Amino acid sequence: MERVIKIGIIGCGNIANAKHMPILFNISGVELVAFCDIVPEKARAAADKFGVPGAPVFENYKDLLAIDEIEVVHICTPNLTHRMITVDALEAGKHVMCEKPMAVTAVDAKAMLDAAKRTGKKLTIGYQNRFRPDSMFMKKEAEKGTFGEVYFAKATALRRRAVPTWGIFQDKDAKAGPLFDIGTHALDLTLWMMNNYKPKYCVGSIYNKLNGSPKGEQGNIWGSWDPEKYTAEDSAFGFVVMENGATIFLESSWALNLIDAREAITTICGTKAGADMVNGVRINGILNDEQYVLNSDFGTGGVAFIQGNQGPSPAECEAVRWIEAIRNDTEVFTKPEEAYCVTRILEGIYESGKSGRVYYFDNE
């Protein structure tokens, strides 16, 4: 019989309820045995819905970490708390899945990475977009050398008017605006496709142009935000130069006056070919001295009334791969070293945008 993996959930808010808990609940050999949230009612509701009978609930995450039978912890708390809780969980002997971004400063992310190395426990970050069919397809082509040397890329996470109106997203001090919220996914995909994790310098622009729009002039899909309380950026852009000379444009927004809004995609351009994620994956290049475009279709079915390729969701694939790494003691799919680089660049773009100066990275 397979060993049962006992998991504790720290943070029982939206991302835990929409992603982590329902998926883990349906994985064979996994039990959710304890829940923690600073709002006790949220922890109790989660335990009642997803927990084993009698699963305890806590307000203080350290009480959950004290439970010996818990082998794995999923951290679904605000960005600024990731370092503290992750380091404590690793030191308590738990493997950790932490939601994205890894942290909002390089110092915090490095502390998490060092704690994982020091304790020998596994640490991964929730970048489920890697598991989309288009992402996996493009990555396989990159690994085959289809694109050659990738020297230019775009990381795109642009919403037209989709500002989260719940939680602390809109508070600039929470570091949870579009750059760290959705730009992080696009940047992770881009660095992963390029297999390039050595930034040299970056320039960033941070905008607060539309967040002051009065109610009735916002057109937000989740209803109007309070312009007095929306202090985080509404859009952020970065130009990143890597040590090998490659360049990356990062585009992120929750509110921007554009029609072609696209979220968590990448475009890569190499010496042999290029690719983007428009309607699947489009690969472009030269063949027999002519330009070509190869279009992939991930939704085609061959039988009437049956959808093609409707497999597990990316988040389900991520969770299964994570549990397999725990059960089989194998390497995690999304490595903390990679997520650390994402945080370094996001912080660099943000700091450059605030200071108006070029941000230089100290590479080990």
Image (cartoon, grey):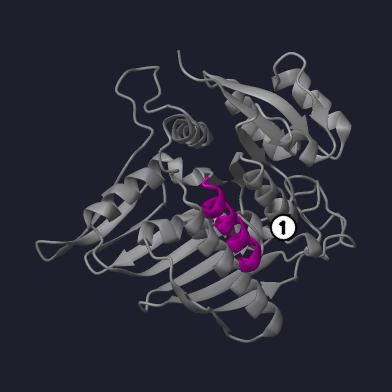
Instruction: Spot the residue most to the left.
Output: 288
Instruction: Give the quarter of the image for residue 145.
Output: bottom left
Q: Residues within 10 Å of mark 1 (few under 14, many from 20)?
A: many
Percent position of residue 268, x then y: 36, 62
Q: Is residue 108 inside the magenta stretch?
A: yes
Residue for badge 1: 176
Magenta segment: 106-120
Percent position of residue 171, x then y: 81, 60
Left/right of residue 43 with respect to residue 94 in the rendered view = right
Q: Name the secondary structure under disc 1.
A: loop
Can the viewer see residue 263?
no
Q: Is residue 212 inside the magenta stretch?
A: no
Instruction: Spot the residue most to the bottom.
Output: 357
Residue at image position (53%, 19%) is: 29
Left/right of residue 151 with respect to residue 37 in the rendered view = left
Instruction: Tell me the amino acid under the disc marked 1.
Output: Ala
Image height check: is 363 above or below 132?
below
Residue at image position (77%, 15%) is: 54
Image height check: is 258 above or below 243?
above
Magenta: main secondary structure equals: helix
Instruction: Spot the residue most to the right.
Output: 228
Left/right of residue 47 with respect to residue 132 in the rendered view = right
Image height check: is 313 above or below 221?
above
